[in-house]
Image: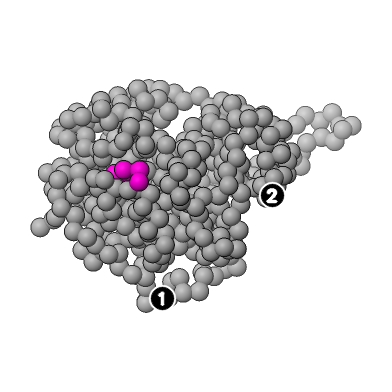
Amino acid sequence: MSPLDTEVPALLLRLDRNPFHHGSLGAVRSLGRAGVEVHAFVERPGTPLGRSRFLRRAHVFTGDPASAADVERALLAAAARIGRPAVLIPMDDVGAVTAARLAGRLGGRFLLPALPDGLAERVADKAELAALCARSGVPHPTTLMPSSAAEAAAAVTGLGLPTVAKWSRPWLLPPGGGLRSTTLVTSAAQARELFRAAPLAGSRLLLQRLVPGGPGADWFFHGCFGAGGECLMGGTGRKELSWPVRAGLTAVGSGRPSPEIAAVARRLARHLGFRGVADLDFRRDAATGVHHLLGFNPRPGAQFRLFTDGSGLDVVRALHLDLTGRPVRPGRPVAGRVFVAENYGPLAALAAGGRLPRGTVAAGRREVEWAWFAADDPAPFLAMTGGWLGRGALSLGRRLAGAAGGAARPGPRSRMPVTSGGHRPHDPGKHQKHETRVSGEATCMTS
């Protein structure tokens, strides 16, 4: 018999339009295997997530992710189709911030953690997080917020190059605008250019001291917190390989105990009164040995299934138990597990010289949590593989067409017309705002 209340369904809210988000698949499988009826928002029918046998229904969100009104309409429409109150689980930062804002308007239809007013937005905001860490005594890299291009140039000089540049609210970045949530700045001129892009980014530019790291320096904590910031389930792990290299998501990670990181995460959650699931990112300073908090994401991390105890309890199941009024038995994650994202791990390993870090995956001796593959749910892996290969072929085709077009371009004295394959290289100094079509919401049933 499942310890979860299988009469209460769950709805995953993800708004970042990433059809290859493996964290959402992990949540669907975790709850579905426990007998919970799982619903999820997807970009379109046929995504890898929508192929999971553990997903009862996929709800296609076609509105504007940045519009709280559009999200509210989609949630209410989904609630009507589900037919009874459901646990709402945001799977990205914009979803977590929006759900917290709408909590008072969703009562009776969804179960959400009771958070202090505005807390989800404050911890997700990189500028607010720096201030929260300062007040809480949590180590955090020196962070400056320039108010002019000249100040941005002076800031990187003072912090030292290279410097890390971040947007305070990265979920506001427009798709296709050419801006990244995090950039490694190597010159004062680059800092000035980034500052001038702030109107497009939609939030303030932060310049942050680069914490000297090295192999094994990047860590994370995933936890579920109950009333008063009590940790119901949690674990620490290390990012062994990332994609893109040194600045991307976890391609390969391993569960490793770190009492220091766990203590910092729990103390901060209690201090803030945080409730729900959180994913915290840390980097160990190679010079001092201190772990600095780099990010506080108020939702499950993509590799949360790395931290699972012997009974199958993870942070998503703990959240469902807590919100449905069931006890959460304290659990300790199974030691030594490894997480691998199949579509990123090989690329990251090749970039690292063709091998995994020593001791990460010893064949037959360590339990591996695959992001996509599951013997009892193979369809998402097959759909991901097909979609990933198709995306790669399309990208290669565009590059080949561009190269052919470039070769056919006339010289300065030629009057030959440019072939249709030619294209203008992207100019990072010129951006166009992305227009999002708002057309309501649809739904599709999984087979």
Quadrant in which residue 74 is drawn: top left
Helix, strand or loop for disc 1: loop
Left or right? Give the position of 306 relative to 198.
Answer: left
- Above or below, 174 against 7 in this view is above
The residue closer to the viewer here, 438 or 160, is 160
Q: Which residue is mark 1?
A: 363
Residue type for callout 1? Ala
Give the x, y percent position of residue 53: 25, 50
Q: Nearer the viewer, residue 398 or 32?
A: 32
User: Depth-wise, is mark 1 or mark 2 nearer the camera?
Assistant: 2
Q: What number is the disc on residue 21?
A: none
Residue 310 can be seen, yes or no: yes
Q: Residues within 10 Å of mark 2 (few under 14, many from 20)?
A: some
Read off the magenta span: 271-278
Q: Is residue 182 positioned above or below 197 on the image? A: below
**Furthest residue toward right:** 413
Give the residue at x 42% y 51%: 280
Q: What is the CA distance from the residue labelled 1 to the residue labelled 2? A: 42 Å
Q: In the image, what residue type sits under mark 2?
A: Gly
Q: Quadrant of the C terminus?
A: top left
Q: Residue at x 48, y 45 (%)?
A: 134
Q: Which residue is mark 2?
A: 160
Specify few, some or many for label 1: CA neighbours under 10 Å numbering under 14, 14-19, or 20 or more: few
Residue at 37% over, 77% down: 365
Q: Report the quarter where the N terminus lies.
A: bottom left
Find the residue positioned furthest to the left: 1
Asked which secondary structure carries label 2, the reply is: loop
Is 60 part of what is drawn in magenta?
no
Answer with the quarter of the image where residue 237 lies.
Answer: bottom left
Rendering coords of residue 133 (x, y %): 46, 46
